Structure formats: C-alpha cells, structure tokens
Image: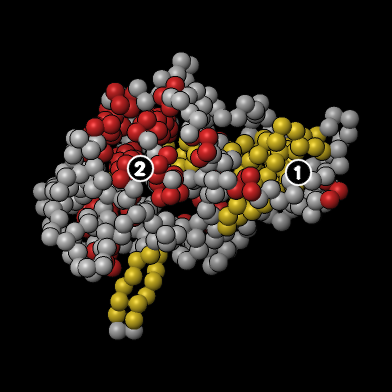
C-alpha cells in the first residue's frame, strides 16, 4: 500500500508529482447544484483498472500553511509492536548501553525539571524529530544537575518504565521554512496544550529548550499506532462496538476543545493514536464499559482559539488535509471551525466503517484514475458520496449489511452535509449511539496514573 498520497498532473513534459494540499487548491468557479448526498455510479471501470483508489492512502505531511515546504513526510506513528521488537538496548546495564541523548524539560504541572533518556527515534518531520524516551527519576541519595547536558545522569534510574514521546523542534529555518512562522506555530501549539486536560487528547507533560536552542515537547506515548494503520491493515479489529467507542471518545474530546473555544482544524485518521496495542484489543470484553481512554487526538499544530460571543467565530485561513476539508473551506468561504471539525469527524467515521475515504471516486465510475482523484475537491464541494461496503448497488445504505452500525450511519449522514444543514456536535453528542458509547461511572480514566 502506498504510504504517501500524491496528486499527479500531466503536461507536455510528462508526469509531475506534488503534495496535494488545500493551501494549493484554488477552486475554479462552479455553480454548486442542489446537494446530492449520494453519487450515482455507472456501468463499470475498464478491465484491470480500479479508479476508486481502493483502500486508504496515507497523506504527506501538510506544512505549507506553517511556512514549511512540501515534500517531507510527517513522522509516522510507531508500528503496533515496535516497542517490543526494537528495544534499542533499553534493558541493558547503563555501562553497556550506547551513548544516548538525555533531554531536560520542566514539568507543566509542577515546574520542576525532569530528565528523559532517549531510547530510539520514532519519526522525522521537516523541522522536528520524535523520539521514544523514558523518564528518569532521581535517586534521593544523590543529586543531579539537570542543567548539564553532558552529565552521564549518575544517580538517575528509570523507575516504573514511564515511556513518553519527545518532539524535538530544531531552531531556525528548516529546509527553507520560515523561522518566524515556525516559532509562532510552536508557541501557539504549546500554549493551547497547556490549557487542555482531557483523557482522549494529547497531553503535554513537560516543555523546555536545550543549549542548542531546540524546543522539547514531552507528550504521552501511545503504543497502539494510529488509526490510519488500523483502518488500512487491521480492519478485523474494527468491530462495531470499537468503532462506536472510538467515535464517542472523539466527540467528547472535540466538544471539550470547542467548549474552551479551541478548534482543531486537522482531524484525520493519522492524528488519532491508539493507547492500547492491537493484540490487547482482542482481550477487551466490553468496549462501552472500559474505564481507560482508548484513543488520543493529537497534533494541535493547526489548532487555534476562536473569539467568544458576541464576536464572530469565523475563520478564513485554509488549512488541514484536503480529503477531510469541509466544502466551505474548499470554496474559500469564511468558516466556523467547530462546524469543519464536525465534518472531519464524519469523514473519519466513514473511513473506519468503509476502509476508504468518502470522496474517493466510487467503484464503477469510468475514467482516468488520476483525473478521478484530482476531482476529489469537486465531489467534496457537492457533497457527493455513497456507501460501498455497507451499500446496495446504487450506493445507498443497505440496512441488512449495516444493521450493527445504524447509529454510525445516522452520524455520517448528519455530518457530511453542507454547513447550513450539517448536524452540530452538540446534537450528535446526545444521540443514543454516541451518548451510550461510553458507559462509565465517574468518567474516563487517564491511561497514565502519574502525579504531574
């Protein structure tokens, strides 16, 4: 399966590949007809051609709106069993380990310095790297100067294996990026993360800078990988009860952000991480009563605070991922970020159900695959989509095929509409399929029982 999503255009010089980003997309003038909720398929594709782009394709990192040039992939989430198979000497005595890097950052909760020993790199972006690390705990009998990065951390030991993810952001222009825009984006991300305390949203544990001017963001580590990987290669895990639980948690998380007048603006499969490794999923008897958070909504790099009433909440910056972008964004209209977040949740839920994105060309439509893919923005603008796995021959919902997911069908069909008809999350949250998706007295428990 391709790991990167590309848009190809053909001219006299051949085929050119570029990042497909809504920051690049300028919609041509179009008369948008009356909304059609379902597209109509034709007689069938040419032999041997699958124009639907069956299956999901991971998008490339969207950085243009942050002042970052295209072409470098976003750090992938760790593979499902990576923490088991690639231990990188973490169980060896300290004297036998290779030289490792130790990061120092201040706890968000207490303001006290903490040390984190790098175990291995998880991924690399245009201007940052992400490392798996273990928190180091100081032995009370000895003291350690955390300000000296050259220290061998004598007197420091790992206790209770507190694994974290450390995002290391390089200073200055990275690959041609605008340093000021990176700094502004980073500052905004950190300030928003400091305001957030929700079991299903990424948690900023500590923040700091080192002697080289690199910013250090210490966050919770999610060993289950991201939802894209699961929806692409582990579909047997996505049972109806688990899909329901995941969506209920995400609605709760996004509603929490909106209540704080924060909009995410980049909700997609790649930005939702699983807190539980895939093999463990088979041992969960009842997803609705599991008391710990199952997913973590991450990557607040495009998030922003919106004005509170009576000021207008409308935004104008086009950002995020094209396949999850609402029609009003693609058509260059001012938009309410709460409504576009709701739309993106509808796209994500559809993808979990169908194993494909809703606005990819439907199977059976004739045409050049590259042209059909390039017309995705137009299908989004017209709200043209249909059911495939759970659909009949006309791509309408089949009640028999989808009898276990009727509540999910109602959510998708309520969300993937033009903004004037889109069901708000405040209403979606109270629908029984969502409301009863989590049945826990006292609310969700944090995955980590750590005193911050």
Considering only order in the chain, which callout, 2 or 1, is on the residue closer to the N terminus? 1
Q: Which disc number belongs to residue 91? A: 1
Asked if residue 253 is positioned above or below residue 168 in the image, the reply reads above
Compared across the picture, whether 153 is left or right of 101 comes to right
Residue 179: percent from left, percent from top: 56, 60
Quarter holding the C terminus?
A: top right
Q: Quadrant of residue 204?
A: top right
Quarter holding the N terminus?
A: bottom left
Q: Nearer the viewer, residue 235 or 158?
A: 235
| Residue 154 seen in the current view | yes
Compared across the picture, whether 22 is left or right of 165 comes to left
Residue at (62% x, 57% y) in the render = 170
Residue 24: percent from left, percent from top: 35, 63
Asked if residue 143 is positioned above or below residue 167 in the image, the reply reads above
Give the color scheme: rainbow, by chain, secondary structure or one colour.
Answer: secondary structure
Residue 291: percent from left, percent from top: 50, 23
Q: Quadrant of residue 156?
A: top right
Looking at the rendered structure, the secondary structure element under dot 2 is helix
């Amino acid at each position: 399966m391709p790991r990167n999503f590309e848009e190809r255009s053909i001219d006299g010089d051949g085929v050119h590949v570029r990042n497909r980003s809504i920051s690049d997309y300028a919609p041509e003038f179009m008369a948008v007809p009356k909304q059609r909720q379902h597209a109509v398929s034709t007689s069938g594709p040419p032999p041997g051609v699958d124009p639907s782009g069956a299956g999901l394709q991971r998008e490339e990192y969207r950085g243009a709106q942050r002042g970052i040039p295209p072409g470098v992939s976003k750090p992938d989430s760790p593979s499902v069993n990576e923490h088991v198979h690639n231990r990188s000497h973490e169980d060896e005595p300290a004297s036998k380990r290779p030289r490792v890097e130790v990061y120092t950052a201040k706890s968000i909760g207490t303001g006290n310095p903490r040390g984190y020993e790098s175990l291995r790199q998880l991924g690399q972006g245009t201007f940052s790297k992400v490392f798996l690390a273990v928190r180091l705990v100081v032995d009370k009998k000895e003291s350690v100067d955390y300000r000296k990065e050259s220290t061998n951390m004598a007197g420091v030991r790992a206790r209770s294996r507190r694994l974290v993810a450390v995002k290391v952001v390089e200073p200055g222009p990275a690959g041609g990026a605008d340093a000021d825009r990176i700094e502004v984006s980073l500052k905004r991300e950190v300030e928003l993360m400091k305001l957030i305390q929700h079991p299903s949203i990424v948690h900023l544990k500590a923040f700091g800078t080192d002697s080289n001017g690199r910013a250090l963001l210490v966050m919770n580590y999610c060993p289950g990988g991201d939802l894209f990987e699961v929806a692409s290669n582990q579909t047997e895990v996505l049972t109806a009860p688990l899909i329901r639980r995941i969506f209920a948690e995400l609605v709760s998380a996004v509603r929490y952000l909106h209540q704080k007048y924060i909009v995410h603006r980049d909700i997609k499969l790649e930005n939702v991480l699983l807190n539980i490794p895939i093999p463990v999923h088979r041992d969960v008897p009842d997803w609705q009563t599991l008391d710990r958070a199952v997913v973590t909504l991450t990557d607040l790099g495009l998030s922003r605070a919106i004005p509170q009433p009576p000021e207008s909440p409308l935004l104008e910056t086009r950002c995020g991922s094209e396949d999850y972008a609402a029609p009003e964004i693609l058509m260059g209209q001012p938009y309410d970020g709460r409504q576009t977040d709701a739309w993106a949740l509808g796209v994500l839920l559809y993808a979990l159900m169908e194993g494909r994105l809703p606005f990819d060309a439907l199977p059976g439509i004739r045409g050049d695959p590259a042209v059909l893919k390039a017309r995705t923005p137009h299908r989004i603008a017209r709200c043209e989509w249909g059911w495939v796995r759970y659909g009949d021959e006309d791509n309408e919902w089949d009640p028999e095929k989808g009898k276990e997911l009727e509540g999910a069908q109602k959510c998708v069909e309520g969300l993937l509409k033009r903004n004037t008809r889109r069901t708000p999350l405040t209403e979606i949250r109270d629908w029984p399929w969502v409301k009863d998706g989590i049945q826990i007295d006292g609310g969700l428990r944090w995955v980590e029982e750590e005193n911050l």
